[in-house]
Image (cartoon, coloured by chain):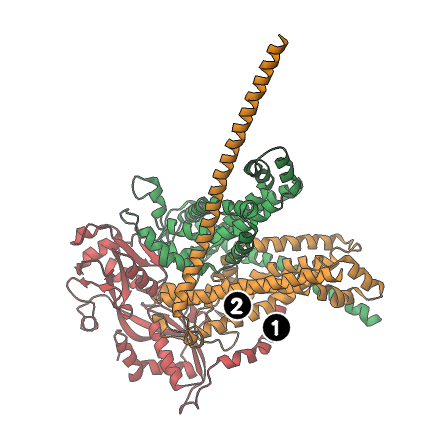
Chain colours: A green, B red, C orange
Amino acid sequence: METRRIVDRGVKYILFISAMISIVIVFLIALFIFREGVEAFNTVGVRTMLFGKVWRPGQEQYGILAMILGSILVTIGAIVLGVPLAIGGAIFLAEVAPEGIQAVVRPAIQLLAGIPSVVYGLFGMVVLVPLVRKIPVPGNSGFGLLAASIVLAVMILPTIASIAEDAIRAVPQSYRQGSLALGATHWQTIVNVIMPAARSGIIAAIILGVGRALGETMAMIMVIGNSVLMPSPMTNNPLTLFLRQARTLTGNIAVEISYATGVHESTLFATGVVLFVLIMVVNISARFVMRERQAIH
Amino acid sequence: MRRLLITVVLLAAVLMASCAPADAPATPEEAAPAEEAASGSISVAGSTTVQPLAELFSEAFMAANADVTIDVQGGGSSVGVKAAGEDTSDIGMASREIKDSELTEFADLVIFTIARDGIAVVVNADVPVDDLTLEQAQNIFAGEITNWSEVGGPDEAIIAVSRDEGSGTRAAFEEMVMGKELLITENAILQPSNGAVRTTVSTTPASIGYLSFGYLDDTTKPVLIDGVAPSEENASNGSYPVVRPLNMLTNGEPKGVIKAFLDFILSADGQAIVSEESYLPVR
Amino acid sequence: MMSDNKTIEIQHENILLQQKKSNLSLRHATQSAFFTILWIGGIITVLILLAVTGYVIFQGFKAIDLQFLITPPRGGLSGEGGISTTIGTTLYLVLLTIAIATPLGVGAAIFLVEYASDNNISSRFLKGMIGFSHFGVETLAGIPSIIFGLFGYALFVSTMKFGFSLLSASLAGACLVLPVIIRTTEEALLAVPRSYREGSLALGATKWQTIRKVVLPASLPGIITGIILSVGRVVSETAVFYVTLGGSYRMPKSIMSSGRTMALHLYYLAMDTRAFEKAMGTGAILILSIILINLLINFLSRRLTAGLRGVQ
């Protein structure tokens, strides 16, 4: 009897310790990355780093503005290309597609969300980059924001589609029946009743997609060209901006961390801090939207 | 916090012990070791220029010494210096001279020059330009010349491909070709390894890059610089100017199996591999 | 007058009816137009995804044969040989990572579900810690993988001097999959009916006995689902291992050896060599392993729901 109680109590403490592990890891990450990063901000200067346009560690120039813009532009590109398709696909699956198609397509889309990003990167290198290169603009190498945006769009498509579909499916059946009973067509019901009701869930899906796009590393290194340069249009057409090579914050860390030393190394941690803050802003807004959604139902 | 880490580490160690049998069958069982066989494992990391050579050295050395495992990793020359200096690897590889700042930071580094290597300027096979002056090459990589028509080619924009900053090849190229004044244009595509530069130049029309001699093959076209072909012969007789040492580094004098491996590399057998791979032997 | 009024009314009604009819047909026309667009959109979405995976699998199968699977890579950066050692390294790393993350993750989830909901937790400190812990899990789940890589590089590779090794990589990988395991286990535990616990406690079992003998067995398929999800995550992860595992393609001899997983091998093949067909082959094997993992998860979750329904 006594040993049972002692074991019971001992187990409780062990479990308590493992329950603390996640917060310990968060703390350690903050400690290691922020401490180093803050050091870089102190030595180089926050303004010089965040708004500096030149990144040449050899010359001790550590501006990461080009990378911040690279990350943001490639994410915007991916959202513009991927979200309409993903939402359309989600509505199609949840409302329009016959049972048979749903049964096959839904698990397939979930499966695709788990495919390694390097596979998409490989596809980008072998198929997309040569295709993009066919666009007749002088200096267009094929590597760049457009190829990277397409790769990301394809990567986040399944993630957004499957979460958005869940959100649409979660709209209570009574909403649909009510709208149809009032004489609305199915399409009117979708536009006027279901989409507004699923709105916050769909927004949350998009925000998760944004998080995934901002955080992607290896596929970006493979197709974006990795040049550190301020994005600018290549001709009079502003869209040629997307034919420029670029570098993302993630790519900068992955490519340079293994050999960086001293201040250069710290600036890479600072790059991580900037990425971390960007993603946190996105995630917190996701949680905010989720909460709002729970409040409605 | 520390206790937690130790727990995690211990846990991992215990797990490893239990995982070991699962690992065993994957290790090829080889015949009885050769005479005077050394044993142990060596980790090598650094320059992607030296990497293919190191892979071949290690394959030959492991064939003769069944009990030796040699891990070869890339990363770039700066990784090699850092890995050797900080003891994260037994041997570091660097395809450039070791900087003074590095020698002050890691005072115990011992440098073995195992070969010499030229850097060739290569273009995509479709580019009809066969030779460039040193100045033209400088201006192309500096972004001053942006169209092939300026150097006798068709009217097509030049796509420059370079290595990123940690690269020994880039450091050597900047020093010997670009000089002190000129910087490589920020419009250049940056790739993290020699192999990636080769892949990019070979698959991108109108592109130009620079590669270690060891990476020259029929997928890219080397151009003459000031009329001199980037060949081993021209490099060893001094007429081709862009040549740098390939180094292996250890932290302190090497001992045991590491010494045996370095001795093998500098032996006639090892140097035969060097010339076979179109690098320049040192003895 | 009366009849006049009536005629007007009737006329009016007729007009309304006509309007309604044309409105209805217009609405139906709009609907079919948009549904056509949705069909096209749906088909395009599926086609894009099929094209990408289909292309890789199709191209990959040209490179795959038994020889590809059982010979180690060789020839340095010429990209010769097969992928046997990378399969081995992947398995090794998966085992290690899961072995580190599972006890911690499952333990954390048990505490958060079984103990944190206790009424007798009155201590403010404990409540605060539990809140912190939930916050920790949420935060970890949102951190991009390269940050885990950076962290692993800073702590395990450099500070603790584990070097580029399986040990460093699996510790960093464990941080990455921990939230996955904690969340799925929490869900699985919450799905176990309250009556199970009450029954066991009423029979005089202690809390731990109840958890070990009743709650854990009932939630096992759910927990295993979480573990398999993490396996998938480790198999497809590249960024974390790119900066912690080194990249040597030899079979690792110990946890201190460097190594190369299949996903990393694909990256190196694609970037450093011109062996695109071998990269495709590796990609095809990766996609097949993910399909296998998904089938396993589907099977288990079906069993979980069936099992719980059966007992209730």
Chain of the residue on which disc 2 is drawn: C
Please tell me whether residue B126 is drawn above or below residue C42 in the rendered image.
below
Q: Residue at x 44, y 50 (%)?
A: A44
Secondary structure, mark 2, is helix
Q: Residue at x 43, y 57 (%)?
A: C52
Q: Are marks 2 and 1 in contact (CB under 8 Å)?
A: no
Q: Is residue A62 visible?
A: yes
Left-right relation of C295 to A150: right
Q: Residue at x 14, y 63 (%)?
A: B227
Q: Nearer the viewer, residue C115 or B81?
A: C115
Left-right relation of C306 to B152: right
Residue sticking out furthest to the top: C1
Residue sticking out furthest to the bottom: B35
The percent position of residue A207, horizontal first and vertical second, equals 53, 46
The percent position of residue B193, horizontal first and vertical second, equals 35, 64
Category of crowding for the residue at label 2, using alpha-carbon neighbours closer than 10 angstroms: few (below 14), some (14–19), many (at least 20): many
Q: CA distance from mark 2 to mark 1?
A: 13 Å
Left-right relation of C96 to B179: right
Q: Is residue B77 visible?
A: no
Q: Amino acid at mark 2?
A: Ser
The percent position of residue C58, horizontal first and vertical second, equals 41, 63
Which residue corresponds to mark 1?
Answer: B10
Quadrant (top left/top right/bottom left/bottom right) for the C terminus of chain C: bottom right
Which residue corresponds to mark 2?
Answer: C168
The percent position of residue A142, horizontal first and vertical second, equals 33, 52
